[in-house]
Amino acid sequence: MAKYKRQFFPGTTTPAKNRRRYLDPKVKLKQLRDVPMDDVVRIMGHRAPGEAYKSIHPPITEANEPACPIRKLVTPIEGAAAGDRVRYIQFADSVYFAPISPYQRAWMYLSRYRGVDTGTLSGRQIIEMRERNLEQVAKELIDNETFDPALTGIRGATVHGHSCRLDEHGLMFDGWQRYLWDDKKKEVMYVKDQVALPLDKKIYVGKPASMSDLKKRTTIFRADGVDMRDDKEVTDFYLRIHTLRTLGGYRPFDVKGE
Amino acid sequence: MSTPTVDYANVPLPEVRVMTHRLLSAETTEKILNDIDVIHNLRQINMSGESLPRTINSGPAKGLANNHTERKVIHVNGHEVELHCLVGAFYIELSVTDEAEMDKTVDEIKAAFDRTIPDGYTIDVGRYSKYRPSLHDYRSA
């Protein structure tokens, strides 16, 4: 029998190729910026930089774990072994060609990271994890190519804006204005943390990418970019899922030979 | 039904709807309002957009001042207008009597927007808001 080779996403168009890249854990994503770890911690707002991690249970080595084959099989992630709290970071992605969209974020998180709980909504994606692991993942996600300072927002609550028109500087709308445009540096700076508590210092997250660059990087199919109907394989894939789900729900006896 | 309090009520005057491609800053909103305010035959201008709360309305920061840079008082023809939103749409009601007059006014509005809005907009003429009471206005609470 041929060895099973993992597949990620069908299609030949740019968004389809980008989806495959983001989902494949063997692909190392490009690092576009380097936001210091302390600043990432500040934006998340769960603890002050330098503060010890709070714990919700004693380290696993000190606890009396019951004899369990699954516990023997699974190596706990660092935060779980230490008994860290579970904390979160949430990203909102604009419909105007953000590098990635919430649904692919979920696929990507589950494909690339261990110890993750993630939830998808129309415009935002939450990731929950043990605190020290979350901080590493958050820094990676802010630094790499899935983040754009103008079109990706770090928003813990009141995320409204992903489907709104952009403002005059090309930034995604945010009623709480967690980030501002610095006209001198031509960069985006965070002035509030993800739940809009004011930050002690401005945190710069870099220059937004140009629209032509974003159109090459995005995973979003759009009528004014790459239409999903122009990619036959993707359309067929979704039509097949749609047909099978409908039949599975209403006429399961008609699903034959699939 | 009671009689209208003003003589122009119940008259479907034409309305110009302008949707901008970008949400406008307070500064641009002030500029465009001053630009169209001088045009004759305008009866009223309504604006809408994305709401900017005065205070943070939920979460751990609830109750703190929002301090949004675009939520401020602008000056239109000597009057103070307090902005509550990032404006993205204008509904301009025209007080005109014939089509020629309407076309002329619409052209003037277009020219003003061309001068002030670099990112583009769409403009439509029609009727987009209510001008007379309907059944909905008589429903009991």
Image (cartoon, coloured by chain):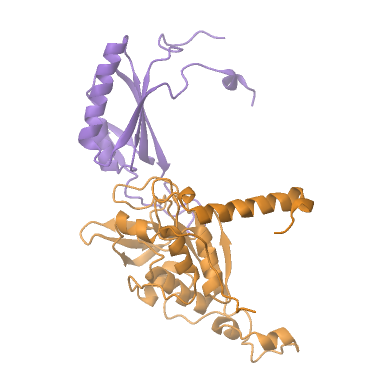
**Residue A183 x %, y %:** 23, 56
Query: What is the number of callouts on the image?
Result: 0
Residue A78 visible to an observer of this rendering: yes
Residue B76 visible to an observer of this rendering: no
Compared to residue A121, the image places residue B28 above or below, namely above
Pick the front one: A106 or B42: A106
Residue at 36% x, 26% y is: B124
**Residue B47 x %, y %:** 37, 32
Chain B colour is purple
Residue at 26% x, 19% y is: B105
Residue at 52% x, 56% y is: A233
Residue A56, by quadrant, is: bottom right
| Image-based side of A209 in relation to A117, left or right | left
In the rendered image, the residue lying farthest to the bottom is A62
Pick the front one: A9 or B134: A9
Residue at 24% x, 40% y is: B118
| Image-based side of A198 in relation to A66, left or right | left
| Image-based side of A128 in relation to B106, left or right | right
Chain A colour is orange
| Image-based side of B75 in relation to A247, left or right | left
Pick the front one: B62 or A68: A68
**Residue B40 x %, y %:** 24, 18
| Quadrant showing the C terminus of chain B | top right
**Residue A205 x %, y %:** 33, 66
Compared to residue B97, the image places residue A180 above or below, namely below
In the rendered image, the residue lying farthest to the front is A1
In the rendered image, the residue lying farthest to the right is A253
Compared to residue A30, the image places residue B17 above or below, namely above
Pick the front one: A226 or A124: A226
